[in-house]
Amino acid sequence: MYNLIGAGLIVIGGGIGLGQIGSKAMEGIARQPEAAGKIQTAMIIIGALLEGLAFGALILGK
Amino acid sequence: MIAKKSITFIAVLVLALVSFKGFAGDEGHHDKGNTIDTPDEIKEYIGHHLKDAHDFHLFSDNASGKHYGFPLPVIVWTSKGLKTFMSSAFHHDDAGHTIVDKGDVKLTKIHSKIYELDAGATSVNFDETHHATNAHKVLDFSITKSVFGMLLAGLLMLLGFTALARGYKKGKKIPTGFGRVLEPLVIYVRDDIARPNIGEKKYRKFMGFLLTVFFFIWILNLLGLTPLGFNVTGQIAVTACLAIFTVIIYLFSGSKDFWAHTLWMPGVPVILRPILAVIELIGFVLIKPFSLLVRLFANMTAGHFVVMSLIALMITLKEAFGPVGSTGMSLVLALFISVIEILVAFLQAFIFTMLSSLFIGMAVEEHDHH
Amino acid sequence: METLLNDFSVGLFVMQAVILLILILLMRKFAWKPILNALDERETGIEDALKSAENAKREMENLQASNQKLLQEARTEREAMLKEAREIKTKMIEDAKTEAKEEAEKLMTQAQASIETEKKAAIADLKSQVASLSIDIAEKVVRQELSNKDKQEQLVASLLGEATLN
């Protein structure tokens, strides 16, 4: 039961983080469309790091 | 040329699968005519799929209790030495009922793991948490389904890329056929993953590892999306091995600057330096590989889980929406998620390679002296 | 975590490590090395081609520049030559003019001198002729006059009168 609550909290946190990354990246791309490639790569890397963190927490709690 | 070759190869493989159909199975544990239709059974089925298997199981005919697929060799290191036999000896039993007697040791399979019975025991006893009390796990070097998938992926890679390499050797400047698809991918890994992260001077040394890992993961991820039912990159041992390779590579190719900055960070008060060194070391030796392995494992497992759950909607929602409605719904949803999974298959291979090259880049970087 | 550790198969790990190691070595030897070398070769080839094209362009430009320079030189030389020729021409004309003038002057003076001598000779001739003529006339007159005695005396008288005036 507590595991599930923890998992929910992790997902909420990760979701907020990913949303931030995505929104900022899109703002950046809208502002500078010519840098879209670089921003995308950076976004994916940061997203992956965040994902790793969230998954790590999920797995540890499982 | 290569395209034709790989098509022939796949055709041969499919033929091989077909010709292996229906090996044994009557003594199977499943009750005849018992289809998987309750949520618990579905959960167990999915859980079983996510695990490694000792035989290549394609599908079962529950009405006749027949299983279609082919057995794979089991190679185990027991207390009495190396034992090999085909997995068909277990007769699809996965609960420790069938005991294979190899003369001096008795082996059985419980939840996709092979156990050796303690001396004198003739059947497995379970405690109330369903742990075997008189058997222990053995070192299992079997050609399991995952190993088979890896071998298949390796073979595909060898066939595809050696053909591309041979094309160049013949003096052709531009690849033909399937090589035209592969070449941009190689260039992509080199120019967009390795070069910017490792640096112009040193990237060449790591290209062999990065390219192999990228295509290996990608092909295995894609194989996981086929109905063959591989879940190789969803095995934590596999992703752990990949991550440990990365760690070994970056730890052993670390420059003097890297170690200096990791163990005795300049420009920081001396008291803080040991603490920083511990943090950095934990980061490089534990956290980074852990995040690498967990990310790939969790993504692929979650992907398989979601796709299979959506397919299972066909059964679980039959009551509520009728057979046509539930089937249509599950097909549409599963198709949608499968398309996303194709993207994820590439993305995870990309991210694993990208982060590996990023970490390698951190390790080999030579700082300007402050 | 426990279920994961339970799922972790050491055997699979070992098999995977062996397979991956062999695969990396095989792929490196038979695929990646030749492919990357071929790519590098192709890229350096393209780069070289571009560079040589650039060089050719630069050489062409140099050639053109040197051509331009040569042309410019030729032009200035031609101009100088023309200028010199013009100068020579004017000088020659000038020289010819002065020479001609001198010649003409010389001729003139000669002519004048000869005219003068001719004139003098003519005058002398005229004088002598006039003298002889006047003598003739005088003779005739005298002869005629002297045939008359009065007149002779008259004449002598006038002559004498003139003589005194001289």
Image (cartoon, coloured by chain):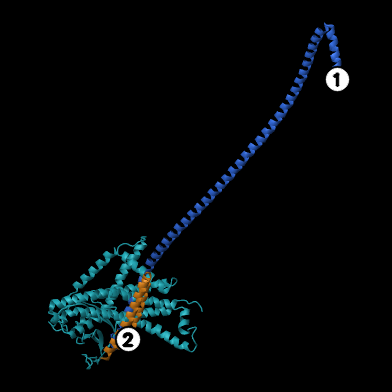
Chain colours: A orange, B cyan, C blue
Q: Which mark is residue B316?
A: none
Q: Give the side of residue B105 with respect to residue B261, left or right.
A: left
Residue bearing the label numbered 1 = C165
Disc 1 on helix, strand or loop? helix
Q: Is residue B218 above or below residue B44?
A: above
Q: Position of residue C117 (x, y in %)?
A: 75, 23
Q: Which mark is residue A57?
A: 2
Q: Disc 1 or disc 2, which is closer to the eye?
A: 1
Q: Chain of mark 2?
A: A
Q: Quadrant of residue C114?
A: top right
Q: Position of residue B71 (x, y in %)?
A: 22, 78
Q: Residue furthest top?
A: C147
Choose between B77 and B48: the one closer to the eye.
B48
Disc 2 on helix, strand or loop? helix
User: What residue lies at 18% left-to-right and 77% top-to-bottom?
Assistant: B330
Q: Quadrant of residue B177?
A: bottom left
Q: Amino acid at mark 1?
A: Leu
Q: Residue furthest bottom?
A: B128
User: What residue lies at 21% left-to-right and 79% top-to-bottom?
Assistant: B308
At label 2, counting other C-alpha atoms closer than 10 Å, the crowd grade (few under 14, some 14-19, many 20 or more) is some
Q: Quadrant of residue B175?
A: bottom left
Mark pair 1, 2: CA separation: 171 Å
Q: Amino acid at mark 2?
A: Ala
Q: Position of residue C63 (x, y in %)?
A: 50, 52
- Total number of numbered discs in the rendering: 2
Residue C25 can be seen, yes or no: no
Quarter of the image with the C terminus of chain A is bottom left
Quarter of the image with the N terminus of chain A is bottom left
Q: Position of residue B210 (x, y in %)?
A: 37, 73
Q: Chain of mark 1?
A: C
Choose between B83 and A41: the one closer to the eye.
A41
